[in-house]
Image (cartoon, rainbow, N blue to C red):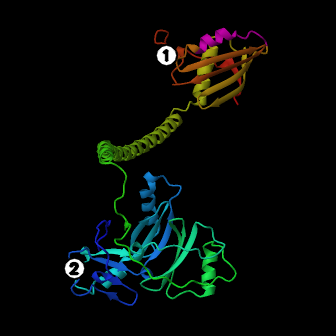
Amino acid sequence: MKFGNFGHDSLFNPAEHFIHRVSDVMPPANGAQRSLPRYWVLSRALYAIRIINLKDVPASKRAAALTLAQAAWTPYVETAHYVIPQLDSALLCAWDIAAISNAQSRFDIDAHSITIIPEDALRAVLPPRRATSTMPLNQTIVLVDALDGVVAVVMTGEQVTAEQWWPTPPSQTVWVNFLRGVGVDRDTHDEAPKPLTSTWRNTPIGHAGGSTQSTASTGERQLVMVAAWILIVPTIWLANDWRQLRSLTYDAQSRLLITERDLNATLGARTQALVGLDRANKLAALINQPDNLTLFALVNDVIAQTVKAGVLQMTEWELRGKQLKFVMLAPSGGAPSATQLVKAFEKISALSDVEVNTDGARTTVSFRISTMTASPSQSDPKNGPQETAPASISGTGK
């Protein structure tokens, strides 16, 4: 198929072209001039028409508006369009490409050398007449013969505002309904007019859908191309940066997974080590647990070196872990001062955090045991063996 604008001056003669009706296709007559452009003229029954109102569209944007209208209106699987421009509107014709191609395949012709045009592009504007006595003076309507059937055309001024095709002349009821549908005032006894004979134009008007009708200058198009190239460079640069960023992100995520796996292993080993250390500390605490008898002998030895025998009596004894607390009473008086007792117990390296509280005849002593050693009298080689005074503390431990 070939689409294009038409501007040649040769007279149109149907006998020199392909006339495609509903029933058949009439090829050019024998002996027809082959130097003229060949048209494939479609009967009005083979295409649909939609009127596109462009009154409120600026002239510079009408081509774009028609392009959008074609894209929005595709009544067939494969649709071809043809545009017939008017003053403030356009007739948009649409037909089935597959159906026309199938009809052309029956002839030994090169489809690319044939230009397809709708019948409306060749129908001349007939002298208008008023259809009803109540119609405005600038509104007219005609009913004309078509290649197939008849066509009613409503015109306002010089523009077609409505069109309707029928396979046969309409009845009065159909005609009245048509007038009512297009908003034409009618008289009570209006009847459908007799169809007028079609008159062909010398040359087709309009252009195929998608043909170039841009008002942009060559300079403007070149400017657009330059701007497009300018935008392509940063786009490619950004795309490359995005690709590198994606690669770096993937590598960072991989390293993060490896680090998390190693960290989990390290934390697991640390947890196991802490559990083992806790068990070892508990075991060591059980092994190094102070003995009550040894502690009592140590305390008795320190008291014996501080006060006279029989002065103090042990009333309470409490050993919790490595913390010892005991209470002594001095019923007859003569109890040592807290300072004396603190100094005496601090001489033992195995004792720490020594505290002594005195309350009259009641003396409370507490300290922490680290490592059991011999008493000062037993560990001093210069003094030699010394006997303790077991009578210095009397009473029972609790």
Q: Quadrant of the C terminus?
A: top right
The mark lying in front, picked from 1 and 2, is: 2
Viewer-side residue, 271 vs 297:
271
User: Which residue appears at 63% of the width and 81% of the height?
Assistant: 176
The residue identified by callout 1 is 379
Question: Would residue 307 be visible to someone looking at this image?
Answer: no
SS state under label 2: loop
User: Which residue appears at 74% of the width and 9% of the height?
Assistant: 334
Q: Is residue 322 magenta?
A: no
Viewer-side residue, 204 vs 92:
204
Could you tell me how far apart the alpha carbons at marks 1 and 2 are, in whole angstroms?
Answer: 144 Å
Magenta stretch: give its range: 332-345
Badge 2 local density, few (<14 within 10 Å), some, or many (20+)? few
Using the image, tell me which numbered label, if any, was put on residue 33: 2
Residue type, label 2 = Gln
Viewer-side residue, 379 vs 197:
197
